[in-house]
Amino acid sequence: MRLQNKTAIITGAGSGIGRAIALTFAKEGAKVVIADWAEKGGQETVEMVKQAGGEAVFVKTDVSKAGDIEKMAGACLENFGRVDILVNNAGIVKGGPLHQTSEEDWDAVLSVNLKGIFLASKKIIPEMLKQGQGKIVNIASVAGLVGFENSGAYCASKGGIIALTRAMALEYAKNKINVNCIAPGIIKTAMTKDMLDNQAIKTNFEAQTPYPRLGEPEDIAMATLYLASGESDFVTGEVLVVDGGFIAK
Ligand SMILES: NC(=O)c1ccc[n+]([C@@H]2O[C@H](COP(=O)([O-])OP(=O)(O)OC[C@H]3O[C@@H](n4cnc5c(N)ncnc54)[C@H](O)[C@@H]3O)[C@@H](O)[C@H]2O)c1
């Protein structure tokens, strides 16, 4: 197993990509902390991990709140005694033309998607420094690499994640803490459901994706597994694009 005896915190693991990461990590031997602000989805993921024979705990966490991040770290240390892997996956999207985007929506997107990664990393890095190694994987998006209309706040947050990932990678490489990010393309989750339920939009995305299907949460989970495992020890500051060729053109 590729994550035997490892402990991982996965934010936003109550749904979609985060849930797939939790299930994949548990299958590979990791004990997982499911950190999500949605209690129902988070508890469901815990049950799914347990039914598959793994170990998991849920901690209700809003990643944009420092107090919740304290609780998240505390729950991991109390239950499992260490933190080897942090996957910063929680994210939200609020679309619309920039001139119609409210200050509240801008702040919400940046607080969850970008500040959440700052808060969680700030809290967990000291544990990794004590342990002498660690893996941080941030879930960005192709929207951090190319522009999408009506997604200014989201694109800015994801571009910020890529910049933050590189800065953190430089800062902690000497401490054997790897910091990488993944840029998913269009993945079938709750976040994209409304969009993909519109047949015209779905057909358009399919036409723009060279690989002959859209992405599944498991596609991102497998890439995250690589970046969380010892197989990627010499990889840091990288942006791994997992998009079926969407932005290769
Ligand atoms: N689905 C896609 O096409 C796609 C593409 C690129 C990037 N992403 C990114 O992947 C990540 C996961 O998205 P998904 O598609 O699985 O969406 P999703 O909506 O299925 O899952 C997001 C999860 O994050 C949780 N969450 C939201 N805000 C939170 C907060 N403040 N604190 C804690 N948990 C919070 C939600 O409750 C939910 O369980 C996000 O960062 C998203 O931006 C998704």
Image (cartoon, rainbow, N blue to C red):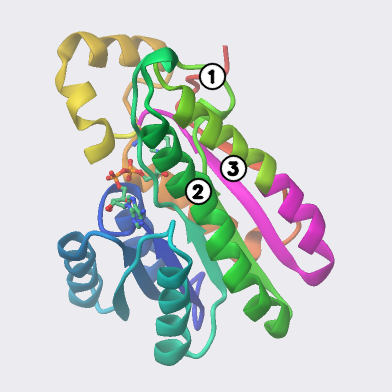
First-in-chain label (3 vs 2): 3
Q: Nearer the viewer, mark 2 or mark 1?
A: 1
Asked if 181 appears above or below 226 in the picture, the reply is above
Q: Residue furthest front?
A: 103
Amino acid type assigned to the residue bearing label 2 in the image:
Ala
- Residue 70 lies left or right of residue 165; in this view the side is left
Dot 3 falls on a residue whose secondary structure is helix
Residue 170: image tag: none
Which stretch did the figure color magenta? 165-186
Q: Which residue is mark 3?
A: 161
Residue at position x 49%, y 79% from top? 4
Residue 16 shows in the view? yes
Is 182 inside the magenta-drawn segment?
A: yes
Q: Which residue is mark 1?
A: 247
Q: Which residue is mark 2?
A: 223
Tell whether circle 3 marks a residue whose Cβ is less than 8 angstroms from ligand 1.
Answer: no
First-in-chain label (3 vs 1): 3
Amino acid type assigned to the residue bearing label 1 in the image:
Ile
Local packing at callout 2 (Cα closer than 10 Å; few below 14, some 14-19, many 20+) is: some
Is 15 inside the magenta-drawn segment?
A: no
Position of residue 233 measured from the top left corner of the image (x, y, whole percent): 71, 62
Asked if 117 appears above or below 209 in the picture, the reply is below
First-in-chain label (2 vs 1): 2
Residue at position x 71%, y 66% from top? 177
Q: Are marks 3 and 1 in contact (CB under 8 Å)?
A: no
Residue 203 lies in what quarter of the image? Answer: top left
Local packing at callout 1 (Cα closer than 10 Å; few below 14, some 14-19, many 20+) is: some
- Residue 143 lies left or right of residue 195; in this view the side is right
